[in-house]
Image: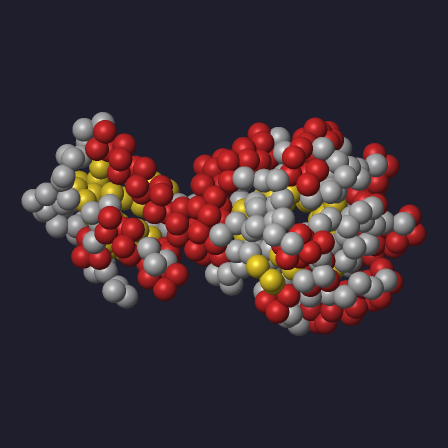
Amino acid sequence: MRSSPVAILHWPEPAAHPPVFPVFLPFSGCPVRCVFCAQDVQTGCAPRGVDDALAEAGRLLHERAGRMRPAPELAFYGGTFTALPSGAFAACLGFARTARQEGRISGLRCSTRPDSLPPDRLEALREVGCGCVELGVQSFADSALRESRRGYDGRTAREACVVLRAAGLRPGVQLMPGMPGSSPEQFLEDVRLALELGAVCLRFYPCLVLEGTELAALWRAGRYQPWTLEAVLDALAEGFGLAQRAGVPVIRMGLAPEAGLSGSVLSGPHHPALGARVQARCLVRQVANALAQARAEGRLGATEPVGLVLPRRLQGMYRGHAGELVPHWAGLGITREHVRFHDERREIRLVRLAGASLDGAATPHEGF
């Protein structure tokens, strides 16, 4: 007897996009130094001149093309790209234009501050083929921006998204849960605002206390306490779910594991598998919500047993990091014996088990 689905969910596949080739310009063009900022540690790249950065990028792109690798998207990260000195800005765009004409890159993106969007520079970016401009918003909340000394307010951050879209560019939004003056509730409001304002991608960078920053001094003085890892996992799982329902990818969660980063983290929610743990927690929440709704609507009895059929690619996500989510599933009444995997890419099924076995088309559970 085949089991009867009581709810069907869909877990999107990762968005297809070309590889990104980053060129880091730490602190370049930045008008202020924010309390949490240590871009050299965060990017694994020491401050350097634009000419040196472009020379290295040219050499690496040439080697990449020689190996017949796919043309990547060139990305200028670190610093405030649209506030670079005019000569440096022109050199970067000239480099991008030539590399694109020669087929060594497929496109261009950059990151900048919401208060550094001169119309002439936005036009120059559009003309050279820049698609996405990632805004280091961090938060739309005035209190958080003020305490972190970002130098702009929430209105400026909101208007920046509108300005980019009007200039024919696609805004990405970078958010920093846990920054001074923020709260989990405010972070989720930041995510909602970013989505409403047309963000085409999001990044979540939980605030860490890094050696050499003003935040480190505040932390040592007891004037700042970072969020716990558990609080960040919960908040990011909610934020990831909001973005997922809106069809907007979260392209990064947590800082990349650059050499020297771990040794510079004094405190804060740092974990090498942060993104995977967030997505796994989000999956549990979505299934729990669907299960509660099915019971509330009478499609499933209050104590009726239920099984779960997942795409095989989510097998590791079901267990969670080091198996941490198995008890959470058991708390929903979904034990290991009631989980199966299939080869479809997206569909998640909650199935009725009373008087039936799991879907005959599903394969036996694996890895438990």
- What quarter of the picture does the C terminus occupy? bottom left
Q: Splitting the image into 4 quarters, where does residue 348 fall?
A: top left
The residue positioned 30% from the left and 37% from the top of the image is 290
**Quick check: 79 above or below 243?**
below
The residue positioned 60% from the left and 55% from the top of the image is 208
The residue positioned 82% from the left and 54% from the top of the image is 28
Q: Residue furthest front?
A: 221
Q: Position of residue 114 (x, y in %)?
A: 73, 38
Q: Which of 338 and 97 lies nearest the eye of the viewer?
A: 338
Q: Where is residue 90 in the image (x, y as percent from the top left)?
A: 88, 50
Way the structure is coloured = secondary structure
Q: Is residue 122 left or right of residue 281?
A: right
Residue 53 in view: yes
Q: Where is residue 106 in the image (x, y as percent from the top left)?
A: 69, 54
Q: Splitting the image into 4 quarters, where does residue 295 fall?
A: top left
Q: Residue furthest left?
A: 355
Residue 37 in view: no
Q: Which of 9 and 234 lies nearest the eye of the viewer?
A: 234
Q: In this view, does 149 lie to the left or right of 208?
A: right
Q: Which of 111 and 231 lies nearest the eye of the viewer?
A: 231
The residue positioned 15% from the left and 34% from the top of the image is 301
Q: Where is residue 131 in the image (x, y as percent from the top left)?
A: 70, 43
**Quick check: 340 above or below 162?**
below
How many marks are shown on the rendered structure? 0
